[in-house]
Image (tube, grey):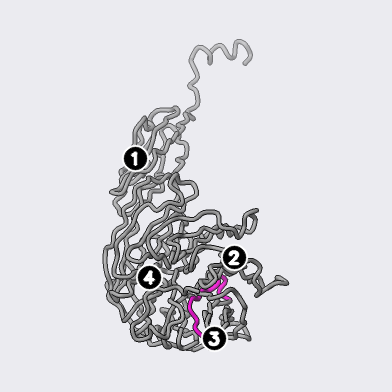
C-alpha cells in the first residue's frame, strides 16, 4: 500500500498515516454566449498565512476564505471581498484541534467544519458575519481516528468525514448530523468504505457521497438519500488511477474529476444517475506530476489541478473542441496543495505548503456576448436594450458590423437605443472583445414596423358618396 505522499509537516512526519487531500465547493454561476478560446490566467497576489497551509474553503458569499494550517493548529480567516479595504489580508487566526487537515463551509455560510487528523475530531467555527462569536471555535465533535477530508451536503443537513486509519483497519466515513434544528445534532453515523478513505464530495442533490480510497485506488459511492432502503451504505465501487486524492463534482452533478496522485492523471467518472455508464471512468487526462487536489469553476467549464510544482488548467466544457485537455499551466508557490474558486468564478486561491502562503490567481475569460433585441416601431422611441456582455479582465468592448436600423446606435458597452427612422428588416453582427480574446460574432436581426395609417386621397373621398360607399 502506498499512502498519498503529499509533503508532511516536519515535526509530525513520522506519525502521519496519510497525507491530506483538499478541494472546494462552489455555487453555480453560468455565463452565456459564445466564448473565445484564449485564456491566460495570472497570479496577481500572494498572501502570507500560518505554518504549513493545506486546505482552504471559500464562503458562499465570496467574502472570506478559511485556510487550514497543519503545524500551526490554526485556521486563517482571509478577507477576499474585492470591495473591502482589507481585501486579501488575514483578519483572524483561529486555534482548532491538533493537525487540522481539511475544511468545509455550510451552504448558508454560518459555520466551518475542520477535521483535526491527530485530534481525531471535527472543530466547528462560527463564520456568520453577524454573530458576536464570529471566527471563534464553538464545538468539537469526536470521530474515528485520522479524519482527513470533509464535505458538507448542499442541503446543509450532514457533513461527511473520511477517516483514514488504514493501519488499524478503520476505513470509514462519519456522517455527522449538522442540522441546527435536528434533535440528533452533532451525532455521528459510521459507514464502512474502501481502504484508506481520504477525500469526499457530495452530489448537488445531496443524494450520494463519493469517497476516494487512496490505499486501494478506488472510489466508494454512498447512498445518502434518507428515504432510500440502502441509505448510508456503499452502492458502487469504482476503480481509478493510483492513489486517488481529491474528488470534485460538476455543478450539474453529471461528472466527477479525481486527482490520481501516483498516476499523474485526472480520472473522469460519469456521475449522472440517468446515464447507462454511471459510476464508470469515461476518460483519463495526463496532468503534472503528483496531482492531489482538483477544483472546478462554478460554471463547470474548467478544472484547476494542484500538482507538485504548478497548477494545471483542464478544459471541462463538453461543447469545447479542446475538452478534457490541459490548456495551460500556472507556476505558483512552493508545493501547491489545495485549490478553491470564488463563487463568481473570478479567482482561484491556492495553498502553497512550503511557502506558508496562498497564491491568488485571476481567472481570465475571453469576452462573451448574448442577446435578442426586440422589434421597433417607426418614429417611436426604441428605449434601451442592453446585450449581456461578460469577460475577465475588463473592460469588454462591443463592436458591430452590418446595417443597424436607421436612427439606432449601439454603444461600446452594448446598449442599443434611439428612434427608428426607417421601416424594414436590419441584420448586423455584434462582437465583444477584451484583452484575452473575442467572442464569436453574434448575428442579430431587428424588425422595424410602420404602423402609420394610410392617408385618404381627395378623389376617392369625393367618389365615395356617388357609388354609395
Cα distance, mark 1 to mark 3? 61 Å
- Judging by the rendered image, the residue that carries numbered circle 3 is 143
- Judging by the rendered image, the residue that carries numbered circle 1 is 410
Give the answer, above or below, for where 109 lies relative to 436: below
Image quadrant in which you'd find residue 336 = bottom left
Instruction: Write down the region rendered in magenta.
Output: 142-157
Instruction: Work out whether residue 418 can be spotted.
Output: yes
For the residues carrying marks 3 and 2, which lies nearer the camera in this image? 3
Q: Which mark, residue 24?
A: none
Viewer-nearest residue: 12 or 47: 12
Circle 1: is it few (<14), some (14-19), or many (20+) Cα within 10 Å? some
For the residues carrying marks 1 and 3, which lies nearer the camera in this image? 3
Viewer-nearest residue: 239 or 51: 239
Find numbered disc 2 in the image and state the secondary structure of the residue it sits on.
loop
Q: Position of residue 226 (x, y in %)?
A: 67, 73
Circle 2: is it few (<14), some (14-19), or many (20+) Cα within 10 Å? few
| Badge 1 or badge 4: first in the primary sequence | 4
Give the answer, above or below, for where 170 lies relative to 203: below
Image quadrant in which you'd find residue 220 = bottom right
Cα distance, mark 1 to mark 2? 42 Å
Amino acid at each position: 500500500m502506498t499512502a498519498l505522499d503529499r509533503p508532511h509537516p516536519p515535526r509530525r512526519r513520522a506519525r502521519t498515516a496519510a497525507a491530506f487531500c483538499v478541494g472546494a465547493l462552489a455555487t453555480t454561476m453560468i455565463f452565456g454566449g459564445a466564448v473565445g478560446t484564449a485564456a491566460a490566467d495570472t497570479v496577481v497576489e500572494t498572501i502570507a498565512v500560518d505554518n504549513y497551509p493545506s486546505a482552504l474553503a471559500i464562503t458562499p458569499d465570496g467574502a472570506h476564505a478559511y485556510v487550514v494550517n497543519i503545524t500551526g493548529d490554526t485556521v486563517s480567516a482571509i478577507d477576499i471581498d474585492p470591495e473591502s479595504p482589507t481585501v486579501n489580508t488575514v483578519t483572524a487566526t483561529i486555534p482548532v484541534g491538533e493537525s487540522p487537515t481539511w475544511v468545509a463551509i455550510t451552504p448558508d455560510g454560518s459555520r466551518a467544519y475542520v477535521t483535526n487528523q491527530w485530534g481525531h475530531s471535527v472543530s466547528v467555527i462560527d463564520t456568520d458575519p453577524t454573530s458576536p462569536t464570529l471566527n471563534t471555535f464553538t464545538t468539537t465533535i469526536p470521530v474515528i481516528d485520522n479524519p482527513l477530508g470533509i464535505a458538507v451536503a448542499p442541503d446543509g443537513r450532514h457533513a461527511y468525514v473520511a477517516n483514514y486509519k488504514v493501519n488499524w483497519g478503520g476505513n470509514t466515513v462519519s456522517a455527522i448530523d449538522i442540522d441546527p434544528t435536528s434533535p440528533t445534532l452533532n451525532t455521528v453515523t459510521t459507514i464502512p468504505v474502501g481502504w484508506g478513505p481520504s477525500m469526499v464530495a457530495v452530489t448537488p442533490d445531496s443524494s450520494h457521497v463519493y469517497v476516494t480510497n487512496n490505499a486501494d485506488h478506488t472510489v466508494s459511492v454512498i447512498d445518502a438519500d434518507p428515504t432510500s432502503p440502502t441509505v448510508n451504505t456503499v452502492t458502487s465501487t469504482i476503480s481509478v488511477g493510483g492513489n486517488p486524492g481529491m474528488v470534485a463534482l460538476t455543478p450539474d452533478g453529471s461528472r466527477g474529476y479525481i486527482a490520481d496522485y501516483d498516476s499523474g492523471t485526472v480520472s473522469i467518472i460519469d456521475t449522472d444517475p440517468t446515464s447507462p455508464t454511471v459510476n464508470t471512468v469515461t476518460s483519463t487526462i495526463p496532468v503534472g506530476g503528483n496531482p492531489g487536489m482538483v477544483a472546478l469553476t462554478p460554471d463547470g467549464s474548467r478544472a484547476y489541478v494542484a500538482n507538485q510544482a504548478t497548477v494545471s488548467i483542464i478544459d471541462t466544457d463538453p461543447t469545447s473542441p479542446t475538452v478534457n485537455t490541459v490548456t495551460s499551466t500556472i507556476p505558483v508557490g512552493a508545493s501547491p496543495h489545495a485549490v478553491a474558486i470564488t463563487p463568481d468564478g473570478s479567482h482561484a486561491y491556492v495553498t502553497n505548503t512550503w511557502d506558508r502562503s496562498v497564491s491568488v490567481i485571476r481567472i481570465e475569460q475571453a469576452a462573451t456576448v448574448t442577446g435578442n433585441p426586440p422589434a421597433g416601431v417607426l418614429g417611436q422611441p426604441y428605449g434601451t436594450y442592453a446585450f449581456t456582455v461578460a469577460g475577465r479582465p475588463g473592460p469588454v468592448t462591443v463592436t458591430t458590423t452590418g446595417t443597424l436600423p436607421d436612427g439606432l446606435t449601439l454603444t461600446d458597452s452594448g446598449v442599443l437605443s434611439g428612434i427608428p427612422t426607417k421601416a424594414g428588416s436590419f441584420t448586423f453582427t455584434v462582437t465583444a472583445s477584451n484583452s484575452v480574446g473575442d467572442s464569436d460574432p453574434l448575428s442579430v436581426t431587428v424588425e422595424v414596423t410602420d404602423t402609420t395609417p394610410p392617408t385618404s386621397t381627395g378623389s376617392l373621398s369625393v367618389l365615395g358618396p356617388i357609388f354609395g360607399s
